[in-house]
Image: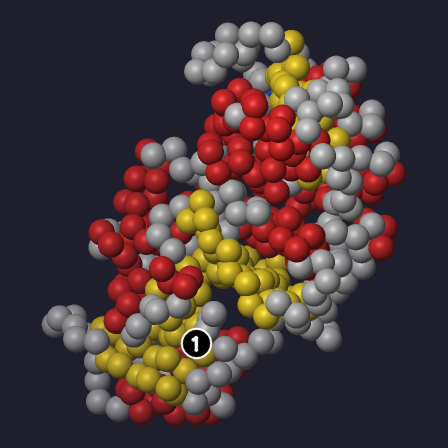
Amino acid sequence: MTHPLRLGIAGLGTVGVGVIKIVQEHEKLLSQRAGRKIMVTAISARSRSKDRGVDLSGMAWEDDPVTLARRDDVDVFIELMGGENGPAKASVEAALAAGKHVVTANKALLAHHGQALAELAEANGVNLRFEAAVAGGIPVIKALTEGLAANRITGVMGVMNGTCNYILTRMEKSHLAYEEIFEEANALGYLEADPQLDVGGIDAGHKLALLSAIAFGSQVDFEGVEIQGIDHIELADIEAAQDMGYRIKLLGVAKMTEAGLVQTMHPSLVPMDSPLAQLEGGTNMVVIEGDAIGQLVMRGAGAGEGPTASAVMGDVMDIARGMLIPVFGQPAKSLRNVTAVQTERETAFYIRLSLRDQPGVLSRVSAELANAGISIDRMRQQSHDETDAAPVLIVTHMTKPATVELALKGIAKTGLTMSTPVAMRIEAV
Ligand code: NAP
Ligand code: HSE
């Protein structure tokens, strides 16, 4: 048997503790499968005295993650602190420069610095692996870089933030407003330290940018992701969507077009009977389309101690077996710097209007839609109380977002709307 693989872990929170548990509880299984012993030699976190509920005896302690990253008795540096800069970036750079393999769950770090870190890793002949950074326990990075390596990928889409999915599904089930369910998710500890990363769609945008890089051989372009969060979603839309046969999901879509790379992370409607609509709570789903494979759907736990630690250890096992894989599936220097383009992709749209309840309003709205070139698939006026605002739901035929915007401007000019119209894409995934 070759010498043991020695791990240094910086960050002993949810994921770090989960990794230590797997190493300890599956010691024999891991060494049988890897052909060598896997052990944790050194650790770091902010507080040395905190009880973490796992046995840390025999592991050297470092206050400074950068020092940990450079230790001679560490072969693989595992970064589980989080944050796009600060100690996470400094320690990952130090480890790579010192010729150590790195495994991280940190999507923010890679979404912002992925290209430079990948070049550093490859210049030093080491791995930089990040399976846990995207869709928790789902091995989607491995699927794209390895199993699907012979495919031309035509599209990647999915639900990649468990917290948003939890909030949206709980709103539908409880009929409670966003603000109340946000507080519930907060009390359950689901939200990132900065909740805007979750509900603002940023965390999911980070993940989509990482998947796009592998799928399309392009440099990570987080700035190019068009992002809308779920913090403006009203219960009225969740219920109206349901009424029309849809569920609202925070859906990421990435496609390479002739004009450039389109990456969107938007709340979107999906048909009630589609696989995406069945996702409950913190579950994630990633859909990959390749020219040879067709459509591949992967579903599983998107977060939490066990699933995320499982993904981290999957990367560790590959390293233990001697695998060396380009960070984004091809040499980092060969990744293309592509143009990010606004999506002009046609889909059906859902539109909710609150209109003055007076004769002729529906025909005025229909005329504005027709003027913009939008054809209506379905239109429904919901019953309403004695207030004079009439809720009207519209499902359009295929059209472009810019066309919908034009139509909504025209409708606003009629003076018949009583609140800001809502429009969302309907995705037929
Ligand atoms: P967490 O529970 O908040 O733990 C963070 C750990 O990092 C803590 O142990 C903390 O130390 C330590 N830490 C923070 N700043 C540090 C510093 N300056 N120096 C040394 N240690 C420091 O976070 P987590 O949920 O485990 O997440 C870790 C990473 O995994 C993040 O990048 C996150 O986005 C990613 N991730 C998490 C999940 C999930 O389900 N939790 C899923 C996918 C990806 P103390 O404990 O002493 O405060
Ligand atoms: N905040 C993230 C989520 C954690 O809710 O999906 C997993 O990346």
Q: Which residue is found at the position 47% from the left and 53% from the top?
A: 299
Mark 1: which amino acid? Phe
Label 1, residues with CA under 10 Å away: few <14, some 14-19, many ≥20:
many
Give the farthest residue toward the left. Answer: 386
- From the top left corner, tell me how far across and down residue 339 is, in percent: 75, 64
- From the top left corner, tell me how far across and down residue 52 is, in percent: 46, 16
Quadrant of the image occupied by residue 344: bottom right
Using residue 32 as the reference point, say whether residue 184 is left or right of it.
Answer: left
Q: Is residue 166 above or below residue 186?
A: below
- The image quadrant in which ligand 1 is located: top right
- From the top left corner, tell me how far across and down residue 255 is, in percent: 64, 67
Q: Is residue 243 above or below residue 114?
A: below
- Here the colouring is secondary structure
Q: Which residue is found at the position 47% from the left and 70% from the top?
A: 429
Using residue 105 as the reference point, say whether residue 129 is left or right of it.
Answer: right
What residue would you read off at disc 1? 349
Q: Which residue is found at the position 53% from the left and 50% from the top?
A: 204
Quadrant location, the N terminus: top right
**Residue 422 in sight in this render:** no
Using residue 39 as the reference point, say whether residue 93 is left or right of it.
Answer: right
Question: Does mark 1's beta carbon lie closer than 8 Å to ligand 2?
Answer: no
**Residue 44 in sight in this render:** yes
Using residue 396 as the reference point, say whether residue 34 is left or right of it.
Answer: right
- From the top left corner, tell me how far across and down residue 90 is, in percent: 73, 27
How many tags in the picture?
Answer: 1
Q: Nearer the viewer, residue 164 or 194?
A: 164
Q: Which residue is found at the position 53% from the left and 25% from the top?
A: 26
Quadrant of the image occupied by residue 340: bottom right
Q: Nearer the viewer, residue 119 or 19?
A: 19
Q: Is residue 303 above or below residue 273?
A: above
Q: Secondary structure at mark 1?
A: strand
